[in-house]
Image (tube, rainbow, N blue to C red):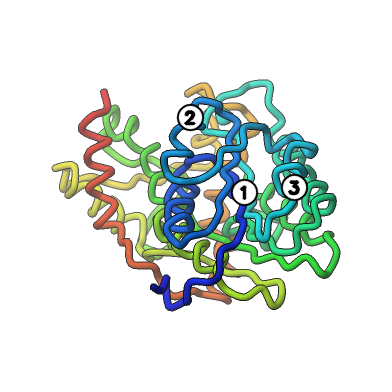
Amino acid sequence: MQLCGIKKQSKMKIVITGSLGHISKPLTATLVKNNHEVTVISSNGERKVAIEDIGAIAAIGSMHDADFLTKTFTGADIVYCMESLGHEFFFDQKLDYRKAFTDIGNSYKQAIERSGVKKVVHLSSVGGHTNKGVGMLVFHYHAEKILAALPADVIIKTMRPVGFYYNMLAFIPVIKAAGAIIQNYGGDAKEPWVSPTDIAAAIAEAVQSPFDKRTVRYIASDELSPNEAAAILGEAINKPDLRWITIPDEQMESNLISAGMNRAVAKGIAEMNAGRRSGVLYEDYYRNQPALGPTKLTDYAKEFANAFNQSK
């Protein structure tokens, strides 16, 4: 049996972070199917049964807890690390999201060092190449730098996906209220998007391929402009005249704050979108442009339409 042209290897012990999220769930299912011993870390004890139903081992604890991570990582052949705070962090008024993500990165670094793991797959993001002009995505840059300080014999495969299709679900309330997509970027310039399914496939391939040296890989599924995206989504929700309207950065930030978003997060999102317009967000992506995955926006549009029709 093969996966993405990679022969199935002998059984490995692999630790997956990210619970049973959009990426970690299909990734875990693939690795279990390929006969690996997979441990899934989740902070939610209620996920234990679901994790075990897939055929994996559940490890319940926090990615902020270096001692817990060290214990869980010990004996593993490979660990897959991602930083996540859950979608609720967008609206947590007291949260310093940069510090929270940095703390997770430091916990991973400590646990990798203490456990002796030598093979790491790290989920970063487009924009991880710089700390300038990428808004809230700057935490990925800092997380990459934290892990890069690990001893040279720790081989790290850094995965940088572009914007996730499911981030478009945030457009739904505004489409319902204003009949349009309203963002502080737009127009006819193409930009990349990605399906979590394609990310999971790329990570599964990375996990099961030789670890020869530290590498960086971008992951994308489709490249299309905001106006093209509006046309595809509009067709899917029976609004063929759906428009994508561009507003100033300050208005975007103000709109997000008015919706209850953490002020620093709102500012970071507006700055990230400005980085799309300026090109800084994608400059390294286009220098290292990957082959596109199979899942196109026209495929995801069906899921978007279901969510749109079910929303109030």
Snapshot quadrant of residue 253: top right
Q: For numbered disc 1, what is the local secondary structure?
A: strand
Snapshot quadrant of residue 224: bottom left
- CB within 8 Å, label 1 to label 2: no
The quarter of the image holding the N terminus is bottom left
Q: Earlier in the sequence, mark 1 or mark 3?
A: 1
Query: Is residue 233 toward the left or the right of residue 90 in the image?
Result: left
Between disc 2 and disc 3, the foreground one is 3
Horizontal and vertical percent position of residue 241: 18, 46
Q: State whether residue 270 appears in this view.
A: no
- Distance CA(mark 1)–CA(mark 3): 9 Å
User: Label 2: which residue?
Assistant: 255
Q: Which amino acid does the dot numbered 3 rest on?
A: Tyr
User: Label 3: which residue?
Assistant: 108
Decide: few, some or many residues near mark 3? Use Cα within 10 Å; few <14, some 14-19, many ≥20: many
Say which residue appears at 60% left-offset and 45% top-offset: 17
Horizontal and vertical percent position of residue 95: 68, 26
Nearer the observer, 148 or 120: 120
Q: Earlier in the sequence, mark 2 or mark 3?
A: 3
Decide: few, some or many residues near mark 2? Use Cα within 10 Å; few <14, some 14-19, many ≥20: some
User: Label 1: which residue?
Assistant: 82
Q: For numbered disc 3, what is the local secondary structure?
A: helix
Nearer the observer, 260 or 293: 293
Q: Earlier in the sequence, mark 1 or mark 2?
A: 1
Tell me: residue 65, above or below residue 312: below
Q: Which amino acid does the dot numbered 1 rest on?
A: Met
Q: Which amino acid does the dot numbered 2 rest on?
A: Asn
Tell me: residue 278, above or below residue 173: below
- CB within 8 Å, label 1 to label 3: no
Horizontal and vertical percent position of residue 46: 50, 25
Q: For numbered disc 2, what is the local secondary structure?
A: helix
